[in-house]
Every structure is written in C-alpha cells, then in structure tokens.
Image (spheres, coloured by chain):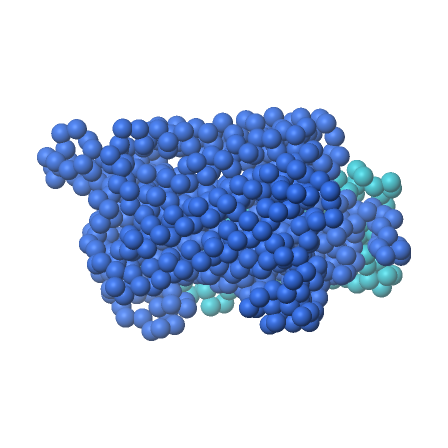
Chain colours: A cyan, B blue
Amino acid sequence: MNIPYTVDERPDTGLTNGKLGIWLFLASEVMLFGALFSTYIILRVGAPEWPHGELNIWLGAINTIILISSSVTMVMAWASLKMNDWGKHRLFLISTFLLAALFLVNKYFEYSAHFATGELPSHSTFLAIYYTLTGLHGLHILGGMIVMAYLLGPGAKMWKENSDQFANRIEATGLYWHFVDLVWIFLFPVLYLL
Amino acid sequence: MDKTGIHPGGRPAHVDVRGHDEPHHEELGWWRKYVFSTDHKVIGIQYAITGLLFLLFGFTLMMIMRWQLAYPGRPIPLIGQWLGQDRAPMGIMLPEFYNQLGAMHGTIMVFMGVVPLAVGGFGNFVMPLQIGAPDMAFPKINRASSWAYVLGGVTMITSFFLRGGAAQSGWTSYPPLATLPIANGQTMWLLGMIFLITSSLLGSINFIVTIVQLRAKGLSYMRLPFFVWAQFVTSFLLLLAFPPLEAAGVLQLMDRLAGTSFFMPSGLVLSGRPIPVSGNGNPLLWQHLFWFLAHPEVYVLILPAMGIVAEIIANNTRKPLWGYKAMVYSVTTLGFLSFIVWAHHMFMTGMGTTMSAFFQTTTMIISIPSVVILTSLLLSLWGASIRFTTPMLFALAFLPMFGIGGLTGLPLGLAPSDIHLHDTYYVIGHFHYVVAPGTIFALFAGIYHWFPKATGKKMNEVLGAIHFWGSFICINIVFMPMFIQGLAGMNRRMYDGGALYTHNAGLPIKLNLVIGIAAWSLGLFQIPFIVNFFGSLKWGKAVDRNPWEATTLEWSAPSPPGHGNFLTEPIVYRGPYEYSVPGAAKDFSAQFEPEKAQA
C-alpha cells in the first residue's frame, strides 16, 4: 500500500506530506521555546537583581558563528543534491555534522568551567534558566546530528533508489536545522549579552 | 506516483496510488500485525481498548475514594485488605493515599482515558476512513505515538508501587506543594506526562497532515464530515498547547531533580524549617503554563465528542445537520478562543482585577460558539422521525448533559461568583457534567455507532438500552448533588468530605452517601456494556458495509476494512449529510454515490 504525496506535491496544496509535517513540528517547537523564553522574561522581571557577565561571551560568539556556518553548509548540501552533485553533497553534509559536533564540544568546555567553580543549576535562577535553555537546545543539536548521521550512513542509499525523496529528506532536515540555529541566535544575546 | 516508479521501500510501486491495491495483500506475522502494525485501524482499536481500560481503572480509583467519603474511617470492603500498610492499614484509607487516588483519577481520566479514546481511538480509526485515505500520512509515526502513549501509561501506573506512592498534588500539580520532596511520585508523573505529550504531539502532526493531504478526490473542506473538522481543530490544540506544558514539566523536573527554583519562592518553610532553595521562583508561572495547556485540553476533550454526536444525530434523524457551516465556523472559532481563556482558572490567585476582567470577558465570548454548536445539534432534531438506536440514545443524552455542564460553567467564568464557588464540589459537578455524561456518553455513542464498521458485527440493542438508562440515571445522581454541596461551600479536596466544618452539616454531608451509592451502581451498569462488547464480537448480528444507511465515506469500505481501506478509489460527489433529499430514490444520498446511481 502506498501513501500518496510522500514524494510528489499534492497539486491543490502544493505540499508533500513530509514538508507539511516538518513545518507543523516546528510550530510546536516554537511554542516549546516560546514558553521557555516567556519563563525567562517573567523570572527576570520578577527578580530583585539579575547577574551580568557570568558567561564567556567569546565562546558564545564562536558558537554562534559555528552554527550560522553549519546552516550555510546545510543549504549547500541540499542545493548540491538538486544539482545532482553527490560528492559535494557528502562534503557539505559531513561539514554540517562536524560543525554541530564542534558546537557541542565548545558547550562542553563552557559547562565544565561552570561546574568547576560550583555554578550548578541550583546556584541561582539565572543559571537555572541558562542550563535549561541551552541544555534543551543542545539536545536539539544532538537530535539533528543523529538524523544527519543516519542520512550520511544507512539512509544514504535511498539516493540511488529514490533521489527525489532523499532530497526531500535533506530539505526537511535542513528546515529543522535552521530552526535550531535560529533558537541559538535568540539564545546568544538573551543569555550572554543582555 | 514517484518518478522512478519505485516504492520508497524498494519494492515496485502499484500502478494506482490509492485504494486499488488489494486489501489483504500480504499475510503478516503476529508481531507485525498487532505489536508493530502501522495500520491506522489496528492502532486506533488498540488506542480505544487501552483508553477504555484506563477509564475503568480511573473510575475504580474514584469508587474507592467514594467509599472513604461515604463512610469516613471505615475499612474498605473487598479490596481494602489488599491495599497494603502504607496505603490503607487495616483497610482504612490513609489521607496520603486519598490524595494519590485523587491526583491519579484526574490524570488517568484526562490524559490516558478520554483523550486516547476520543483522539487516538476514534480519530485514528474513523478519520482516515471518512476522508477516503488508505492510511495516515505517516503510518510509522502513528505507531511510534501509540507506543509513547503506552510508555506514559506504564510510567504512571508504576508510580503507585514505588515508595511514597503516586503523585498526590492533584492533576494540576501546583508547586510549591508538587515540588516538595515528600511527593516522590511526582517525578514519575512528570516523566509520564512527557511521554504522553510526545504521543499527542506526534499524533496531532499526523492528523493535520492526513486531513490536509490525503482527502479523497472531490472532498473539499466544506464537504468534510463534522467529525473530521472536530479532529482537525483538536489536533491544532494538541499541537500548540501541549509544548508549553512540556516546557513547564521540564522546569518542574529541574526543580525536583537539579534543585533549581523556577516555581519555588524565597522564604518557604516546611515543618518549621526553611527549605534550602535558591528562591526567586514564581509559583504562579506554573499555573499559567499549566492552564495554557489545560484549558485548550478541555476542548480537546469536548470537540471530538461533539463530532461524534453530530455524525450520529445526522444519521439517526435522517436529516442534514442544521447549520453545518455555522458549526464549522464555530468549531474553528472555539479553537482560536480556547487559547486566550486559561486564566479563568486563576481568579483566586490574586493576579489582579485587570487580568480577571480580560479573562472573564474572553470566557463569556467563548460560550457563544459552544452554544451555536449545541443549538444546531438540538435544532437538527426538529421535525425528524428519529431512530432511537443505542448510539442515538447516548448522543441525545449528550445534548442536555453538555448543556448543564456548560451553563453551570458561567458562574465559574465570572470572577465575583467564582470567589464563592472556587475549589468547591460545584466545580467538580460542572466539569464532570461536561466530560462524564457529556464526552464519555458521546464516546459510548461512538463505540455503538462504529462497532459494526470495526468488527462487522452489530452490538446488542437491549443490553445497550440497559447500559444507557442505568448509566444515565446513576450519573445524574452522582453529579447533580455536587452542585448543592458546592453552593453550600463544601471543599473539593477534603479527605473526610469536610465533616468538621459546620457549613457542611446536614444535607451537604449526607449527600456523600447518596453519591457513593449512585457511583457504585454506575459501576455495575457498565457490566452490560462489557458483556455486550465481547459478546457481540462472537454472537453479534453480522452486517454489510452500511448497516446504519449512512452517507459518509467510511461506510463505503468493507466491514471491517482491510489494510488499505477501500476496494476502489473513493470519489466524493456531495456534502456529508444529504439525507432525505427530495426526489432521491432513498432517504440517504451517500457522498460516494455518483448522481446517476441516485436517479
């Protein structure tokens, strides 16, 4: 049994199932992070004082650059598929994966520096929301890396069997990846700069 | 369908996109057929049966609580001795255990009973059939969401057997109470909720994509059966309202496990000792995040029920629904408005009169679309020659029961009267009228209505009538006295029913015995249903495709439909409820019958 519109677009909606699905998923993600950002605002407005300069702005800035670059390589991975250049696609997808890993490595050094000085989540409300927001964001990075690892490994053979659907999968992964990137672009100023 | 002509799984594609493929094309092993089946009908039936079992379990918890309220301090008969020393020594219920039962009754009924049955069960089984789809858009995700539901259920049930027992801070889990270390089951509750939320999120994405993408040829939005519309709006509510609760759950988990204080204010004292938290948290924030889900959740509970009732009323009145379009616009309006009424649960928290004024205004506005839908259903009965089948009995009872539930909600939505009624049995009476004789009756109606489609057998009408009349009378004796108790000021969470308070003396406290007896009788009247359910599988009258002479697409598929649902590609020729069309040969013009067949 075949499910219609998994690969081709439905004419009257102009969408494939997967594309609509990933956008709906992102809508729910907006609500998830929206609730957490609202929590941040309410806690900060209600706090008698709010710490400044507790985080390493340089590490945060480097991570911002890393994530933005990974979004670019993600788009290139999809675009080279559309231009039928498998080698370039592999190169760009592997780069995205490595940049994501680099982001997490940076994050690890950041976390362990805090842990070393006893700055645990229970230390203050600021650190509590910092760890929760960045931790959840880190889990999203990890989730994206798992998907990319699948698409680089066992999932890659779909390219030969069904190139259109494989390109759709890369596109959906890209949409998710840009969202994760976007969340960080909000997180960086909110937590590190403001 | 795809350009390469190859199925995504590597198998050659069928020539036709949908329907045409043989319904019983491959024999699957037991594991693939049931445990890992991706057929929406199997998943739907599994959801429905699990949901029914959870409803029975949740109801049993309440029957035990009702013993404590009717006969405070007396040993629980039958099962009392099995409950154990830390729950009910000598069969006498401990207050902590009463609190666990209360919290878990609410959680189980809402998140593991009604929603899985109404959305996971009926939505999964009926909706793809009604839109002429071969399956859900993402069958594997459908299976994943059903397993997430099972995991959530297991987590919740397990918490009863851990030290300290299950969650005991009410289904609303308000901090600081819920965050205090005494309530160990709360951690399990939060983990269980994260599974259940995941299940709902995956399910809702699947539902929306299926409805948008897999509608059959000719099935425009205004030809969708009202049930599909109800599921469509419900899915958006689940998709957008659940993530904030997930966020709140993560924050409360952090409070409990990592020692943060998102919801813990400074200066809390427990048993004479200050609690060591960093402080500066905001307990009201939990309530906002919780009710931002939990108010839309009310509509998640009620909209599928309205959808089921609409289908059954149209079918048994042999008339089109009165005001189908108005109902569709109302249900979408309800969906939007349900996101901006949540703080009417919080009038007593001191959030300020400006906030109260805003939320009581939106609450009054949201009653308008609800009344439009209910009135349309009521007016649909006008001048009809009604078939009083069992599903129709339940559907008819839904109308006044939901009406009572809705109207008694108005004094709760207005801040001044809510100050008196808040946290009393009046609230319990109000929302149970909406959900129990309202939604659950509609769900029973749906079971009787679609049982023939799912099994090919009809349920017994006599047993159905006994089930209906017994339940209908008992459930009203359970919930109607609660309005009297609540108006007298009886608090809803008292372990002994509030016997020590003088305002409860006399009639209000005596009603607890009446309610108890009615609740246990209500339990007994479910036996005919259980007998009917299983008996009809074996001895029920075999039926053909369309036993109710209905118009919507699911009745064009075989009963039960095979994998892939339809034998030929369904094409839709007309609106969903064209009953008694003047000049037509029959009193129903089905959506799937071309004009020529009508003449």
Q: Nearer the viewer, residue A172 or B342?
A: B342
Q: Give coordinates of residue B83: x percent, y percent.
A: 62, 69
> Which residue is painted at 17% across and 28% down in the image?
B582
Among all residues in the image, which is located at the extreme front?
B506
Q: Position of residue B358 (x, y in %)?
A: 65, 27
Where residue B482 appears, x then y in whole percent?
Answer: 58, 42
Q: Is residue B107 left or right of residue B385?
A: right
- Residue B112 on image: x %, y %: 52, 56
Q: Residue at x 86, y 52 (%)?
A: B269
Horizontally, residue A71 falls left or right of residue B458, namely: right
Q: Residue at x 35, y 57 (%)?
A: B41
> Residue A15's image quarter?
top left
| Residue A3 visible in the shown view | no
Q: Give B25 or B510, whichever is nearer the viewer.
A: B510
Q: Nearer the viewer, residue B77 or A37?
A: B77
Above or below A66: residue B432: above
Looking at the image, which is closer to me, B343 or A175? B343
**Rendered-image quadrant of the C terminus of chain B:** top left
- Does residue A182 sit above or below B30 in this rendering? above
Residue at the image position 47 percent from the left and 34 percent from the top: B403
Q: Is residue B369 left or right of residue B39?
A: right
- Where on the picture, by quarter, is residue B35? bottom left
Viewed as shown, does residue B374 lie left or right of A191? left
